[in-house]
Image: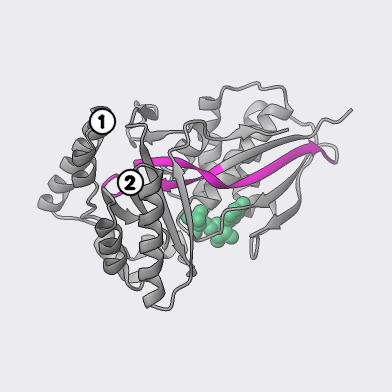
Amino acid sequence: MDTDVEVFAPATVANVGCGFDVLGFAIHRPGDLVVARPGPENQLTIESIHGESEGIPLEIEKNTAGVAAKALLDHLGERRGISLEITKGIPIGSGTGSSAASAVAAVMAVNEFLGRPLSRLELLPFALEGEAIASGGAKHADNVGPCLLGGMVLCPTNANIEPVQLSYPETLHAAVVLPKLHILTTKARAILPAQIDMKTAITQWGNVGSLVAGLLQNDLTLIGHSLQDVVAEPYRAQLIPGFPDVRLAALDAGALGCGISGAGPAIFAICNGNQTAFEVAISMQKSFAKNDLESYRYISPINPLGAQRTR
Ligand code: ADP
């Protein structure tokens, strides 16, 4: 009998401008695949990693998928041997939630393999434990949350608040452009100041509030105006050559708003409709090309499903 379970976990755009560390959404592609199958008794192993996998460790305790799966197995007191096979579709250090997707796919694959003892939402803390090793120990669910649950997800750090799935205008599309550059989250985090002043904080939380209102009220103009990030982007922009021009190119081509995806270097633009998103992505790529930067583009509506079992 074939007992293999395969799960696809999609790329995510975290931060979404002003929602630094608390807001993210899932897109349809790219994504990571994790297969869970019977393995050596009493052991969790990663048998292989394929795809965009350069430098990703096979050791359980150094791999976000391994740490997440182990945390789940420990919680369940489960001793069955499980072997994981990972296929990376999301480039690492891209700002599109590569490390989070592996963690999410792993916990969901293991949970399915074991007959689904936990609900999707109950898997979140274990995926987060895996993701934390790629973020210098920080536990922010703005990639893991939307990757696991789908949609646009607010993940406040207040322990009493569970992730909130927000409604949004159905025509919203993301143009995500990834230049051929690597920025590790740990480096992009180190560049940020430890403290911000009151005026900056007020601007930021005002923007987050109005962004959420814009999403819930289907107000495209409000969404566009609210995306501005005054906390992280002013520092992180210097890590991406030509960022101000790419943003202008996106806005000129009709984007509602534009910002750095996660820790970068991917840049996302929120657009109304697929055709505009396509034109915006092309304009952003042309702008990167002026800085001799090749880039990939991903165009997607918001992915409402999140991770899915595919086998
Ligand atoms: P991203 O923001 O695209 O997830 P990060 O910089 O956060 O990229 O994470 C990449 C870091 O996490 C690298 O050091 C990588 O080796 C490590 N890592 C460990 N396991 C994985 C995994 N399964 N997938 C991706 N990165 C992983």
Front position in the image: 79 or 272: 272
Front position in the image: 186 or 95: 95
Question: Does residue 181 belong to the magenta stretch?
Answer: no
Quarter residue 146 falls in: top left
Residue at which label 2 appears: 271
Q: Is residue 112 visible?
A: yes
Identify the residue at image location x=72%, y=54%.
49
Quarter residue 173 falls in: top left
Amino acid residing under circle 1: Asn
Within 10 Å of the Cα at label 1, are there few (<14), some (14-19), or many (20+) other Cα atoms? some
- Find the magenta span and give its range: 10-39
Identify the residue at image location x=31%, y=55%.
259
Identify the residue at image location x=80%, y=36%.
81
- Vertical side of 40 occupied by 17: above or below: below
Residue 193 percent location from the top left of the image: 26, 61
How far apart marks 2 and 1 lie (CA) works out to: 13 Å
Q: Is residue 267 visible?
A: no
Ligand 1 is located in which of the four quadrants?
bottom right
Amino acid residing under circle 2: Cys
Residue at which label 1 appears: 218
- Of helix, strand and loop, which one carries label 2? strand
Name the side, left or right, on which 272 lies relative to 100: left
